[in-house]
Image (spheres, grey):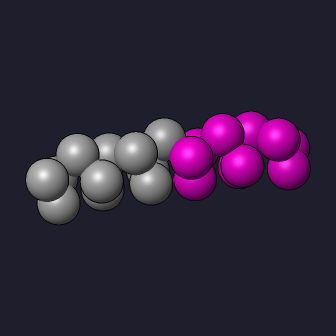
Amino acid sequence: MFKRSYVQVAAASTAVHKALI
């Protein structure tokens, strides 16, 4: 459960990073 949540957060973080750039 935690692992899945971490992956989801990582994906969201990457999306935000791409949006900023």
**Residue 15 position within the rendered picture, expressed as x and y whole percent measured from the top left:** 66, 40
Q: Is residue 17 magenta?
A: yes
**Residue 11 position within the rendered picture, expressed as x and y whole percent measured from the top left:** 48, 41
Determine whether 9 is above or below 15 in the image: below
Q: Residue furthest front?
A: 1
Q: Which residues are magenta?
A: 12-21
Q: Residue at x 85, y 50 (%)?
A: 20
Relative placement, left or right, of 1 versus 11 is left
Badge count: 0
- The C terminus: image quadrant: top right
Relative placement, left or right, of 13 versus 15 is left
Relative placement, left or right, of 20 versus 16 is right
Mainly helix, strand or loop, the magenta region? helix
**Residue 7 position within the rendered picture, expressed as x and y whole percent measured from the top left:** 32, 45
Q: Residue at x 71, y 49 (%)?
A: 17
Q: Residue at x 72, y 49 (%)?
A: 16
Q: Is residue 20 magenta?
A: yes
Q: Residue at x 30, y 56 (%)?
A: 6
Relative placement, left or right, of 4 versus 9 is left
Q: Residue furthest right?
A: 20
